[in-house]
Image: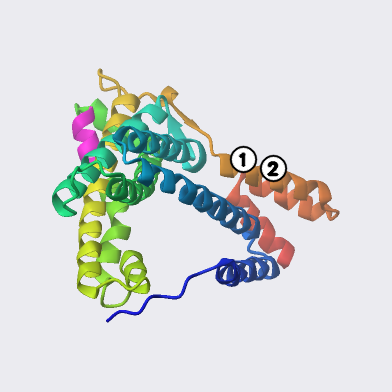
């Protein structure tokens, strides 16, 4: 007979948070320069999960498909914004709409299929089943789409001569997309999930199984839940990646099979923040050689390495 697990309080959360603080201190000591990002991420995680807990209590109590649909819409909008405005270093025109469409189709279709036929939820839109599944599906789809679009758009910008040759010799955008975009994009996006499934149960115990066991759930049922979720996550990631890459292909190569680099531009909120921090260090630096070195790093990484080696010598 399973014993009830002890209740958790703020003290236990604070002990776990102290490990994150120790990681930030370690980053500061070795000069890894990630302590600010870790602290902000930890703060966001704390606030967002607290808000989610308060919202889910009301959503589960309402038992309304419209409330569940509203929460999913907010999650999808926030996920698309995360991919386009925060993670993407290179963007294409109408990227927010294309990413939102890809995430919506994959998340809604796979989540409803899972709750209806795998979890036997009746009705399928039951918030207690649909919202958690959709959240896990959307989270993995966001990671996969971010990886795939970054690789695809970098191919457009960094290997444009190669693409122009293929198009000049009569390749259509669909042939180009299938051979040069879809295959590597899907492979990159699914590599983390394939790795997780390969070591799951043998080397690592996954999060869903761990959570179920910690709250006193049955081992057999927890394992079945984990198997269902891993198969579902791999399928939803593949669907969202394929849709996002195909939509990017339509934008970046027009109907006349011409490469449209004017529809691709670089922007990254995180890179902008890093550049601002670098300029602040420039102002505070007193060594003229260090100032010249930092300025050279922002322009040419190769020249900065040569100059760094000469300064060390």
- Helix, strand or loop under label 1: helix
Residues in magenta, as a range: 173-180
Which residue does the image show at 30% across and 65% down from the upper left?
Answer: 196
Which residue does the image show at 56% across and 55% down from the upper left?
Answer: 46
Residue, far bottom: 1
Task: Tell me residue 304's x, y (percent).
Answer: 65, 53
Residue, far front: 61
Disc 2 crowd rating (10 Å Cα; few below 14, some 14-19, many 20+) is few
Residue, far right: 286
Residue, far left: 117
Quick check: marks 2 and 1 in contact, CB under 8 Å?
yes
Residue 96, relative to residue 241: is it above or below?
Answer: above
Residue 175 is covered by the magenta coloring:
yes
Residue 82 is covered by the magenta coloring:
no
Which residue does the image show at 38% across and 37% down from the upper left?
Answer: 76
Q: Where the N terminus falls, by quadrant?
A: bottom left
For residue 93, say whether it is visible: yes
- Helix, strand or loop under label 2: helix
Task: Tell me residue 41's x, y (percent).
Answer: 56, 54
Task: Tell me residue 228's x, y (percent).
Answer: 20, 59
The residue that disc 1 covers is 272
For residue 164, say whether it is visible: no
The residue that disc 2 covers is 276
Within the image, what quadrant is residue 270 found in?
Answer: top right
Q: How many discs appear?
A: 2
Identify which residue, 24 or 47, lies in the foreground: 47
76 horizontally vs 34: left or right: left
Within the image, what quadrant is residue 9 found in?
Answer: bottom right
Q: What is the CA distance from the residue labelled 2 to the residue labelled 1?
A: 6 Å
């Amino acid at each position: 007979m399973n014993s009830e697990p002890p209740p958790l309080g703020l003290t236990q959360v604070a002990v776990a948070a102290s490990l994150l603080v120790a990681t930030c201190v370690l980053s500061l000591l070795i000069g890894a320069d990630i302590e600010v990002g870790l602290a902000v991420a930890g703060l966001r995680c704390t606030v967002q999960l607290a808000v989610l807990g308060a919202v889910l209590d009301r959503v589960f109590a309402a038992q309304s498909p419209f409330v569940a649909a509203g929460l999913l819409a907010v999650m999808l909008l926030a996920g698309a914004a995360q991919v386009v405005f925060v993670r993407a270093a290179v963007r294409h025109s109408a990227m927010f709409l294309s990413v939102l469409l890809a995430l919506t189709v994959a998340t809604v279709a796979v989540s409803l299929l899972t709750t209806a036929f795998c979890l036997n939820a009746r009705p399928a839109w039951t918030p207690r089943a649909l919202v958690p599944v959709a959240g896990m599906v959307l989270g993995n789809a966001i990671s996969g789409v971010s990886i795939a679009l970054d690789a695809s758009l970098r191919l457009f910008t960094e290997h444009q001569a190669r693409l122009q040759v293929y198009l000049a010799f009569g390749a259509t955008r669909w042939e180009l997309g299938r051979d040069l975009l879809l295959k590597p994009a899907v492979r990159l996006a699914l590599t983390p999930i394939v790795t997780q499934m390969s070591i799951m149960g043998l080397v690592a115990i996954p999060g869903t199984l761990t959570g179920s066991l910690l709250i006193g759930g049955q081992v057999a049922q927890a394992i079945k839940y984990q198997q269902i979720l891993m198969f579902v996550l791999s399928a939803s990631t593949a669907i969202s990646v394929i849709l996002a890459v195909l939509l990017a292909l339509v934008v970046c190569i027009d109907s006349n099979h011409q490469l449209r680099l004017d529809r691709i531009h670089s922007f990254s909120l995180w890179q902008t923040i890093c550049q601002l921090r670098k300029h602040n260090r420039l102002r505070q630096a007193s060594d003229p050689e260090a100032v010249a070195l930092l300025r050279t790093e922002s322009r040419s990484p190769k020249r900065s390495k040569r100059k760094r080696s000469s300064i060390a010598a």
